[in-house]
Image (tube, rainbow, N blue to C red):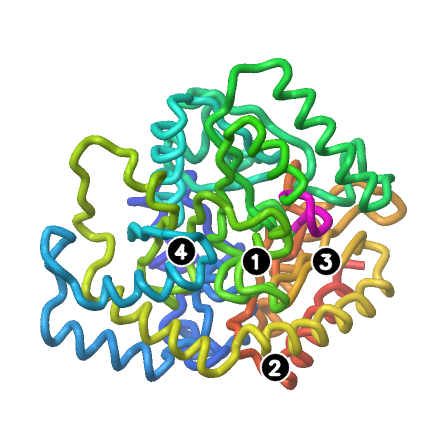
Amino acid sequence: MSSLHQRHLAVSPDWLALYYKNPVEITHGEGRHVWDADGRRYLDFFGGILTTMTAHALPEVTKAVSEQAGRIIHSSTLYLNRSMVELAERIATLSGIPDARVFFTTSGTEANDTALLLATTYRRSNQILAMRNSYHGRSFSAVSITGNSAWSPTNLSPLQTLYVHGGVRTRGPYAHLGDAEFIAACVADLEDLLGHTREPAALIAEPIQGVGGFTSPPDGLYAAFRRVLDRHGILWISDEVQTGWGRSGEHFWGWQAHGENGPPDILTFAKGIGNGMSIGGVVARADVMNCLDANSISTFGGSPVTMAAGLANLSYLLEHDLQGNARRVGGLLIERLRAIGAASECVREVRGRGLMIGIELVKPGTDEANPEAAAAVLEAAREGGLLIGKGGGHNTSVLRIAPPLSLTIPEAEEGAEILAEALRSVG
């Protein structure tokens, strides 16, 4: 055990997780690579949990951060902030929400917490619909709507949460159905649920469930839900903390795969927009955003430095069509991984879109989750020079792959080969 690891254990909570038996200290990065304290280089296929969206040490972002830090680092939302206004204008337009207002936070957790505050205040209801296998953050309110017991440490809650079917296509009571029948069954379940309860404030859903192992419903499920929600006046919150900014390749936002009946009432974002800087936020139509009748500010949300980073990062993303790159390179990568998975008895499914790919592992010859194999592959991939993540509901048995969106085809091939060897090493 390294001395830094020992010092970490001495001052950190027991529940503060670290990857790897011998945790790695990352000291610097460039492009799609990072280096550890021993000077070893790794291909990064997890991007600080889907946060390094464009590239490590992207010159356009580091320059914007440095120049802004040289002028002023902090002022708070009590003062006008040109970069915050400019970024809010761009995000409001990109969101697809009419008459949109934007509020910046420091994280996705805080963004979802704010969305819950808005929805429950607007609707005068503390009842929330959430998806099974979901994850929305680590605050008191966010863990109370998280449908994944591994990430929800308490049953205590300021909210009453009711869980809905549909977030996981290939497991659960409707997995055997075709897509249209699956959607119909989930809608019928939602209709039945609403017949047994008071009127909820909102449905919150990740279009692709992140911590849950990159699971998703068939396209159009949330559009079908929207027809039901609208009849009851229930708001739709799309949690785009992991799916936003073009990561899926096919769409800029995850909700657009379900956009037949319009955009969500509230959209939350974070992670990739800051490329590592602490940016989160909420977009909502004006009547929802303005429903609060008490004062509120944000000390650190929308800070001059993070907003400068977000503007530079978003500009780079759009100017270099990184959504298109995620579609092209991600499509090649997922097909390569499916071919690799077909040769492994441990792989149940390779799923995902763009550069958001999950590999679900099971015990050979069964449909039983295999968290031990996932942990072993994580270690073997690191030994091979590749950093990946893991997740999944019930048991952590899904390998999570989410590189920066500037990933090249040779890098995708290199990472796939390391993963193939890692999977072979565990049988």
Alpha carbons under labels 2 and 1: distance apart? 17 Å
Q: Quadrant of residue 323?
A: bottom right
- Residue extent of the magenta highlight: 215-222
The residue beneath circle 1 is: 389
Marks 4/2 in contact by CB < 8 Å: the verdict is no
Q: Amino acid at mark 3?
A: Arg
Alpha carbons under labels 2 and 3: distance apart? 20 Å
Marks 2/1 in contact by CB < 8 Å: the verdict is no
| Secondary structure mainly formed by the magenta segment | loop
Depth check, front residue: 403 or 414: 403
Q: Amino acid at mark 1?
A: Gly
Depth check, front residue: 395 or 266: 266
The residue beneath circle 4 is: 270
- Answer with mark 4 or mark 2, whichever residue precedes in sequence: 4
- Answer with mark 3 or mark 4, whichever residue precedes in sequence: 4
> Helix or strand or loop: what does disc 1 sit on?
strand
- Answer with mark 2 or mark 3, whichever residue precedes in sequence: 3
- Answer with mark 2 or mark 1, whichever residue precedes in sequence: 1
Q: Which residue does the image show at 44% across and 82% down from the upper left? A: 319
Q: Residues within 10 Å of mark 3 (few under 14, many from 20)?
A: some
The residue beneath circle 2 is: 411
